[in-house]
Structure formats: C-alpha cells, structure tokens
Image (cartoon, grey):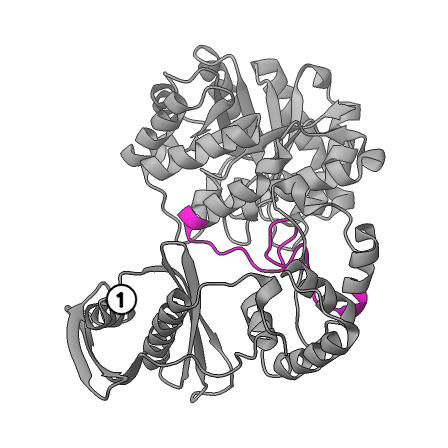
Amino acid sequence: MRKIYIFDTTLRDGEQSPGVNLNMQEKVEIALQLEKLGVDRMEAGFPAASPGDLAGVSAVARAVKNASVIALSRSREQDIEAAREALKDAQDPCLHLFLATSPIHRQHKLRMEKHQVLETAEAAIRYAKKYFSKIEFSPEDAGRTELDFLCEVTEMAIRAGATVVNIPDTVGYMTPYEYGNIFKTLKENVPGIEKIQLSAHCHDDLGMATANALAAILNGADQIEGTINGIGERAGNTSIEEVAMALETRQEFFQAKTTLTLSEIARTSRLVSKLTGMVVPGNKAIVGANAFAHESGIHQDGMLKEKTTYEIMSPETIGLKESKLVLGKHSGRHAFQEKLVDLGYNLDDEHVNAAFAKFKDLADKKKSVTDEDIVALLEEKLIETPEVFSLETIQVSYGNQSTPTATVRIKLLDGGYLEEAAVGNGSVDAIYKAIDKATKEEVELDDYSIQSVTHGKDALGEVHVVLKQGDYAVLGRGVSTDILEASARAYVDAINRLIEKRKSPARSRDNVTLI
C-alpha cells in the first residue's frame, strides 16, 4: 500500500493563527510530541521573520532526531541564509522555498511577469542547493495559477534541484475535483515528475481542506501538509488527524496509508490545544469531545448491541479510553441501565424503573447528567450539599491600570462570619484567593467554564468549577446574572461538596441503601 508522507506545519502555519504566539519551550514541547506521533517532516518556523523565530527553529532542530526539520524561506538569499543558520544542527534539514505564481499575486503583490517569477524561483532553488540536499518548492496560490504555467513552474523546480514540489491551495478556493485535477495534470504533463514528490497544502476557507487533500492523494500526491486540530491562517489548514483516520478507516478505497502512531493523536491534539489556547470544538471530527459521544436513545441502544452500528472507528485507535454514552433527556432505558452497571449497581427492574423516572425528571432540568448526579439519585442525595460556608457578599475593585482586588464575606454554619480580601491576576482569581484565605482550604482549580442559560442582556450565567484536593475532585455550580457572583458561588459550592466528600468517602456499592 502506498505511503503518504506527513508534513506537519503546526509550528509555522499553525502559529500564524490569530492570537497564537508560542515561545521556544512550547515549540520544542510540541515538536517532541509530533515526533512521538510519527510525522515524517515538521516545519518549525520562518527564521527570517524574527530573531525569536530563528531561535525557535534552532531549538526544534536540536531537539528532534527522528523527523526532518524544515524552515520556511522566501526566494531571497538573505532568507535562505537565515534558514541555513537555524537548521545547522538539524539531523535531517530541509528548506521550504516559496514564491507566488497566480495572476492576482503576480500583478498586485509581486509586480512580476511570468518570466521574472520563473527566473527568481530558479535562482533561489539553485542558490539553496549549495547548502541543502532537500528542498521543497511551493508556487504560492497554485490553486489559482494557470495550469499550463503551473506545469512550467514545476518543470523548472525539478530542473533546478527541488526534491518536493508543493501545490498550495493558499486561500482555500479549490473544490476536490479541481484540486485533484491539478495533480493529475502535473503527473501526466511534466517531464521528470517521477524524480520528485508532489505535496498538497490546503486551507479551509470553504470547509474543503481535508476533502481537497484526499482528492490530491487519489490523484497521485505523495505528501500531505497540515496541522494538528486544523489550526492555521484564517479558517485553518487541513487537519492531519482527519486525513490520517480517513486513510486508516477507508484503506480499501484510498489504497494509501500514513505511518503515524495513531494512538498519539488524542494526546497531541490536547497538547496543541493547551499551548496555543485554541479550544477544539466539541463537534470537531476525530478529536472533538463529542466525536465518540452518543446521547440519542436509538444510537445508544445500537452502540450497546454492536458498536459499529454508529461508530466507524474506535476511540482506542486515537488514544482515547472508550466511547461515551452521554446521559441526557434523549437517552433511553437501556443506556441508563448500562450506566448503573458501570457504576457498580445491580438493581431489579422495579428499582431501575423508579431510578429511570427520577433520571428523566432531572434530565429535563439539566443539559447533561453526570455520574455523580446518578449516584445522588440512587442514594437519595438530591438535596443541597450542607453549607459549611455560604457566600454573603463580594466586592471587587478592578481597573485596567490597577490590580484586581476582591473582598468576600462568608457565613458559617454557627452563624459567624469570615471576611477576607486578596489580589489576583483578574477579578475571578482575586475572588478565589480571598475565598481560599477565608475557608483555609488548599485546593487546585482544575477546570472553569461559563455558559449562558438564558438569552438577552440580563441572561443568567452558569459557572462550573472543578476543584481537586489530593485524591478528591468535586464539581461546583453557581448561577447569577452577575458572572463574578456566579463564579464565587460555584467555588463556595465546590468547597462545601469537598468537605462533605471528605466526611463521607465513597462506600462500597454493595452496602448502599438504594431508592
């Protein structure tokens, strides 16, 4: 089966996502994880862009041993020299040269005629060939370049010494048929095309990056360029994980595969999301939180009988533990009963029916029902957690040129009060530090999320926090039209739940009195 090479540009094109700015240590951390994932080539940055970018590429070049490290360069000698300096310690260096070729770029950006583009690109490739044995050349905006001229450019690049010619759909304009046809045309019309690899680099402006990349594979592309989670300029790039799993899942159709360690996909996705700050949408293919989650009762019933009824790939393949049957108002009795078994409960039909009725009532009030909610149902704990602490008042002082300060007043069970003040990095941080001082609880904030539960300017905001203390983890919830108050109430709620959990650690399921 034909191998498709994976060229990862998370550290270069991915970092061009608005708001993303990776430091040197973060670039190296991602690069080492990409190495574990098994990418063949990784583009570490654009050394001529800044001294910091040059240093980042150098650090990656020194750290990575089992993948080719690539630096981007314009078709200019000074850019090539910067890349040469950045890659001097790389075990397997490669230079990525580019020059625009489309009519709109030639006229408005380069102000060059076709012959000038050819001459400039050829001179750059020949100059780079003195220092690099591996050179990839990209005719920028190839998708909107005249096909006959693109053939001419490709032939020139082969003649000058390029080892890979990349065909970028720089602005995500192509359809799969059009883009695949470019590769077919190049394969059929360019002399010496068998001497090089053809690469596909697609953007997702029209939502077709993955489809275009796969069309390129079907028409002879040897390499796919993309990013983890599909991040990148504007709407992003081809998602590497999507291409890899499409080839894995539909091997009989594509007759091609990558050599990625697929079980590292989920871990790589999480790391990139964490370090770039770009949250993966829940419905994102392959790595979204809902990619292997099922709430519909019909789907859950099918999954419990035979997983392949609704899953075309297994979550274990990408490094996840298992699929999730999300319990909500659409869930059926079968899924609910299986969840009870998973939680360690073995109930007769009468008790299951009673529990299911209570579950449905709760599911109508909540967007999703957690395992803790179900345990509470079964143990008749659907009452509020005893309030060791209750929030009386909060006062926050904040200005864009002053340090956020918060004062909290906490009421105790015996009727007494505690009052503390603290400063923080932001208003919520200051509130939480003040609550920590008042309650004297040492906790770790593991998760914080906000969502609107109503509409309009006076919408209720619901805050969820997860606090950890040793082996304990608890969820707290707070609702208010003021998000700072909701944040404080969620934090105090979680602390009360933590205290209650310490008093009553989970008992053996066999000894629990049920409904």
In the image, residue 344 lies at what x, y percent? 64, 60
At x 71%, y 82%, the residue is 357
At x 57%, y 75%, the residue is 379
Secondary structure at numbered mark 1: helix
Q: Which residues are magenta?
A: 274-299
The answer to whether residue 344 is magenta is no
Q: Is residue 111 left or right of residue 241?
A: left
Q: Is residue 25 left or right of residue 380?
A: left
Locate residue 188: give its quadrant.
Answer: top right
At x 48%, y 41%, the residue is 13
Q: Considering the image in quadrants, where does the N terminus appear?
A: top right
**Three-letter code, disc 1:** Asp
In this rendering, the answer to whether 473 lies above or below 27 is: below
In this rendering, the answer to whether 249 lies above or below 301 is: above
Camera sees residue 144: no
Q: Give the labeled residue for mark 1.
A: 429
In the image, residue 483 lies at what x, y percent? 36, 79
Q: Main secondary structure of the magenta part?
A: loop
Q: Nearer the viewer, residue 132 or 371?
A: 371
Q: Considering the image in quadrants, where does the C terminus appear?
A: bottom right
Q: Is residue 337 left or right of residue 480?
A: right
In this rendering, the answer to whether 41 lies above or below 218 is: above
